[in-house]
Image (cartoon, helix red, strand yellow):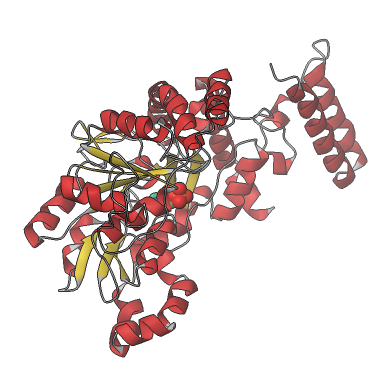
């Protein structure tokens, strides 16, 4: 199926061989050559097996040289869907039916009463806050451990993002700390189901309803995730989704807001459609709401999403099984702590497989070296997000005319101290991620991830010195 892999493997081994050869003494070169030869010839007994168990950095061979499943996944179905839109000449949602059909399908899938498709996930969050009339002087509670769009949507409305620290066990917003961050200016609480696992929805919804503050769920990573058997995104006043290229459901770009509130649904619709109400029999010039923009999804994306939707549940089942297996296996390695789910979580989307890496149990091997060693073994991984609450761009925003006019100097001056997130700082230092496409692999693929981590753990002391 992938003829490229056999050549890749040879090249990689040859490259490693050459790299080692230039570094090592002549005797060692001879040994290494014998080991490499053993890999390709069944006749040569591999008497240097021990060497193949070394990390690549120490002269061993990688756990794997093949790729994990690539993303996105498509076939003729998507091809036909796109061509159908092309030939229909109806490329705009006002003319075609694909976006409408996708909205109906996504409503059914999530069991939400309304759905408004948007240009992307950022637009979905922007529209949610816009429909709630969030604006200058308002405060929105957000987690620091998220994709930057969550914060940008708040800043675009000239509101103040108020960060609440992360629960290191789950990587989610620490719901127990939300109430202390509420002021008389708090107009929304925006948890993110980061990595695709639900935040502590029970606690967040209890605070929201008791304090009468709407909850906007940023579910951009959490397609099909469930809390107590219901889809995430249906608990808050709105739930926001992204269909950007990396997401579990994708059209390259795209997004959606779901809501069970009839009035809010119309406000969302008009916000995403330049204040224009839904089209009736003829062209509709009724403006409603307070302001808006063009945040519409195109028909091509609607058609693509409908086709991709048919694959979602099967893909999700594969991720469920792989992630459960991987978490169990990895947890056996000292220093590796996979992110936990709250009791109410009945399904994670496994958009990211997140874990905390404890370098103390890896002989002090810094995370950056662990990540590099995993990559050497053929396991792509990343260190994830940086702490958003300390990003300079937010302070830059505070220096603009609008923020300077609207917020009292002591509010802006005290913001950094007020939004300190020490637990999150540590999570950002320790996090290791694998991406959702890797969770679409085989059981053997998961075993490779575990084997690589075990190998690095075993040789951590030498790697730390190398
Ligand atoms: C991807 C993402 C967004 C933004 O979605 P886009 O489609 O990229 O605009 C917002 N929030 C979170 C948590 C995300 O992961």
The answer to whether 145 is drawn above or below residue 401 in the figure is above
Image location of residue 200, percent across then percent down: 22, 47
Residue located 72% across and 42% down the image: 58
Please identify the residue farthest to the front as the structure is shown: 282
Image location of residue 411, percent across then percent down: 29, 83
Please identify the residue farthest to the top as the structure is shown: 43
Residue located 44% across and 47% down the image: 119
Please identify the residue farthest to the left as the structure is shown: 210
The answer to whether 70 is drawn above or below residue 193 in the figure is above
Q: Quadrant of the N terminus?
A: top right
Please identify the residue farthest to the bottom as the structure is shown: 409
State how many labels appear. Answer: 0
Of residues 75 and 362, which is closer to you in this image? 75
Q: Is residue 346 left or right of residue 320?
A: left
Of residues 23 and 13, which is closer to you in this image? 13
The answer to whether 162 is drawn above or below residue 172 in the figure is below
- Quarter-of-image position of residue 144: bottom left
Does residue 390 appear in the picture of this structure? yes
Image location of residue 252, percent across then percent down: 53, 40
Does residue 357 appear in the picture of this structure? no
Q: Is residue 374 left or right of residue 169?
A: right
Image location of residue 353, percent across then percent down: 44, 39
Residue located 41% across and 49% down the image: 121
Q: Is residue 59 left or right of residue 257?
A: right
Q: Is residue 54 left or right of residue 428?
A: right
């Amino acid at each position: 199926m992938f003829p490229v892999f056999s050549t890749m493997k040879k090249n990689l081994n040859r490259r490693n061989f050459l790299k080692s050869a230039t570094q090592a003494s002549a005797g060692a070169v001879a040994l290494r050559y014998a080991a490499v030869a053993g890999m390709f010839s069944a006749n040569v007994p591999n008497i240097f097996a021990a060497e193949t168990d070394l990390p690549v950095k120490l002269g061993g061979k990688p756990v794997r040289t093949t790729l994990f499943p690539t993303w996105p996944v498509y076939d003729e179905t998507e091809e036909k869907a796109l061509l159908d839109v092309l030939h229909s000449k109806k490329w705009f949602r006002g003319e075609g039916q694909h976006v409408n059909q996708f909205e109906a399908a996504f409503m059914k899938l999530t069991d939400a009463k309304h759905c408004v498709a948007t240009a992307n996930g950022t637009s979905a969050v922007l529209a949610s806050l816009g429909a709630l009339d969030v604006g200058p002087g308002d405060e929105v509670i957000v987690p620091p451990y998220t994709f930057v769009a969550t914060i940008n949507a708040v800043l675009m409305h000239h509101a103040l993002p108020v960060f609440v620290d992360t629960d290191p066990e789950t990587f989610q917003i620490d719901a127990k700390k939300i109430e202390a961050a509420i002021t008389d200016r708090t107009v929304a609480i925006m948890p993110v189901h980061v990595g695709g696992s639900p935040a502590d929805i029970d606690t967040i919804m209890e605070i929201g309803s008791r304090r009468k503050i709407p909850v906007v769920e940023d579910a951009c990573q959490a397609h099909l995730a469930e809390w107590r058997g219901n889809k995430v995104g249906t608990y808050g006043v709105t739930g926001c989704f992204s269909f950007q290229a990396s997401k579990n459901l994708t059209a390259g770009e795209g997004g959606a807001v779901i809501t069970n509130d009839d009035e809010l649904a119309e406000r969302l619709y008009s916000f995403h459609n330049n204040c224009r109400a839904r089209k009736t029999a003829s062209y509709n010039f009724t403006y409603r709401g307070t302001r808006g923009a063009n945040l519409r999804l195109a028909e091509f994306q609607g058609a693509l999403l409908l086709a991709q939707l048919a694959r979602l549940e099967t893909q999700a089942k594969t991720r469920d099984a792989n992630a459960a297996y991987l978490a169990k296996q990895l947890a056996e390695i000292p220093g590796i702590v996979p992110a936990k789910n709250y009791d109410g979580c009945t399904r994670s989307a496994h958009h990211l497989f997140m874990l905390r890496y404890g370098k103390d149990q890896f002989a002090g091997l810094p995370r950056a070296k662990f990540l590099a060693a995993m990559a050497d073994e053929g396991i792509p991984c990343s260190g994830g997000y940086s702490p958003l609450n300390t990003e300079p761009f937010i302070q830059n925003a505070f220096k603009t005319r609008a923020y300077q006019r609207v917020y009292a100097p002591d509010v802006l001056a005290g913001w950094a101290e007020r939004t300190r997130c020490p637990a999150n700082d540590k999570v950002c230092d320790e996090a290791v991620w694998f991406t959702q496409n890797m969770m679409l692999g085989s059981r053997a693929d998961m075993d490779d991830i575990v084997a690589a981590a075990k190998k690095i753990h075993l040789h951590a002391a030498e790697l730390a010195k190398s």
